Image (cartoon, rainbow, N blue to C red):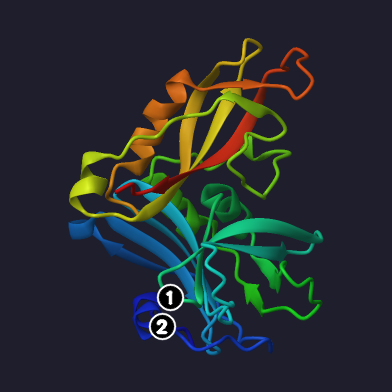
Amino acid sequence: MRLNWITLLAAGLAAASTAAAQDVEDWDIDRDPDHRRITASVFFSDGSGVATRCIDRSFAVLLVGLPQAPDDGDFMRPLSIDMGQGRHTQSWLRGETPTLAFSLRPARLARQLRDGGRMQIYDAANGSDAPLIAIDLPPSPEAINATLEACGLPADDPRDAGRDWVITPSPQPLRWRFAPQMAAPDRALSGRLLRGIVVMSCVAQTDGRIRDCQVEMEHPTGFDLGREALRATRDARVETSDGSEIAPQVITFRINYTRRN
């Protein structure tokens, strides 16, 4: 039995069972033109599930039904994902409820989810071999592509190849010579937003400038954090750790927003 994702989120969810969930045939599509939202979701009788979502041109992939993590004050949650090619540790953002998490590279993950298959999720913090969630996802390229398209994202992106899943404030494998300085957007100030996060990918050039930047993820939406992050990267510069010439490459990093009194 599949459950509506809005109902699950509103309920807060109980901790997910590690037992295999019941099989489902396809992802559900939910369209809400009034709020400019489209969601592709698949949920199981044990409360676990995955959703890809576009709201007002902001894309997200959500994991639902995670066991509650300890409240250590960190808004990041490291998880390891195994979809048949070994575990890959990824950075996830804790959701509004303790059983919810957002991917920091949602478009890349969504493209992987299209093929379906066995998905096992582990707690990367303690290295346990017992999965937090183990589900069999049905393939659904049409449903997931619809959410990507709604956000203006390509069905395939060369930036997905050969990239680390762990996203830090540093533009790995390079480092900042001049880090982007993100100001507080007016919407964030008027909305009294306390904190937020933007994940960016850019192309580093040989002279240390970065270009072709794009917002991979912003949370929460509706506060112009992504727009301000794009502005902040115009004057940013990167360098190698040993001062050698930079080979042109795609870099990924995150910018944390914290309200200053």
Residue depicted at x 58% and y 77%: 69
Residue depicted at x 29% and y 54%: 193
Verify CB contact (< 8 Å) between mark 1 and mark 2.
Answer: yes
Q: In what element is the residue under mark 2?
A: loop
Relative image position of residue 229 (x, y in whole percent):
40, 35
Label 1 sits on residue: 97
- Exactly how many numbered labels are in the figure? 2
The amino acid type, in three-letter code, at marker 1 is: Thr
Viewer can see residue 157: no
Residue depicted at x 51% and y 85%: 47
Q: In what element is the residue under mark 1?
A: loop
Relative image position of residue 259 (x, y in whole percent):
34, 49
Disc 2 crowd rating (10 Å Cα; few below 14, some 14-19, many 20+) is some
Up the image or down, 172 lies above or below 108; here it is above
Residue depicted at x 70% and y 38%: 161
Report, in whole angstroms, how far the alpha carbon at label 1 lies from the one at label 2. 6 Å
Relative image position of residue 131 (x, y in whole percent):
73, 78
Relative image position of residue 9 (x, y in whole percent):
39, 78
Label 2 sits on residue: 12
Front residue of 14 and 189: 189
